[in-house]
Image (cartoon, grey):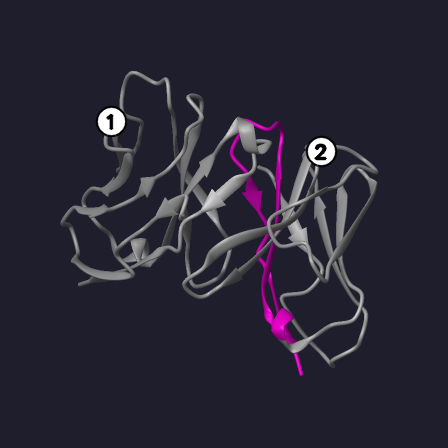
Amino acid sequence: DVKVTQSSRYLVKRTGEKVFLECVQDMDHENMFWYRQDPGLGLRLIYFSYDVKMKEKGDIPEGYSVSREKKERFSLILESASTNQTSMYLCASSIGGYNEQFFGPGTRLTVL
Amino acid sequence: AQKITQTQPGMFVQEKEAVTLDCTYDTSDPSYGLFWYKQPSSGEMIFLIYQGSYDQQNATEGRYSLNFQKARKSANLVISASQLGDSAMYFCAMREPLSGNKLTFGGGTRVLVKP
């Protein structure tokens, strides 16, 4: 079974802090994705990556950056956290662009 | 304009009955894919079923089936014989090659199965 893990289930940070959210997948998938989920808005794509050291902006990249130094790991970085970044963050991976995405358990981030 | 629309924010269904979750989409890409995901209260998104735009038959996976009406641009999920464990949020999503094969999600429908 594909396993996608995220470093924390719950995280509380203060405004202005630098925040790292880590995602690891164990199935050698090329593609990895970061979404945020807010009530009524569904999931919105922040960034994605098709390969190591490659990254593409999604629909809402502002205020975020990403890093993919190894194939299995995709990190989401909030350079200076703000209260409007309080949300559920979901990481996903897929074997190819046409295939279903497998999701991690999510990180619920609260920025105070 | 919304790419994926789920008009039912929430619904109740009696255990053992069938339920249909609506999903309409908007795309000019002739080749696209439609996905349904389930999100229980634990938060993890679980892939349920996939329908490709060129598939001739409606997709089925166990108790899940997809009522694909291409001309109407709808891809409704049908869950037969509902179980208490089906209580969850359900999301419809679309993949468009012209958009780099990203997934675009609808707002979701919350289903609560009553015993």
Indicate the quadrant where residue B35 lies: top left
Dot 1, crowdedness within 10 Å: few (<14), some or many (≥20)?
A: few
Residue drawn at (71%, 60%) of the image: A7
The x, y position of residue A98, in whole percent, is 54, 26
Whether labels 2 and 1 belong to a single chain: the reply is no
The x, y position of residue B69, in whole percent, is 24, 29
Q: Amino acid at mark 1?
A: Ala
Of helix, strand and loop, which one carries label 1? loop
Q: Which is nearer the eye, A94 or A82?
A: A82
Which quadrant, please, contains the C terminus of chain B?
bottom left
Residue drawn at (61%, 73%) of the image: A84
Residue A50, disc: 2
Residue drawn at (45%, 26%) of the image: B29
The x, y position of residue A24, in whole percent, is 72, 47
Q: Chain of mark 2?
A: A
Dot 2, crowdedness within 10 Å: few (<14), some or many (≥20)?
A: many
Which residues fall within the magenta stretch?
A84-112
Q: Which residue is mark 1?
A: B71
Drawn side of residue B14 relative to residue A65, left or right = left
Please say whether residue A11 is one of the residues in the magenta stretch.
no
Q: Amino acid at mark 2?
A: Tyr
- A83 to A89, vertically: above or below: below
Residue drawn at (68%, 54%) of the image: A61
Of helix, strand and loop, which one carries label 2? loop
Q: Are dots 2 and 1 in contact, CB under 8 Å?
A: no
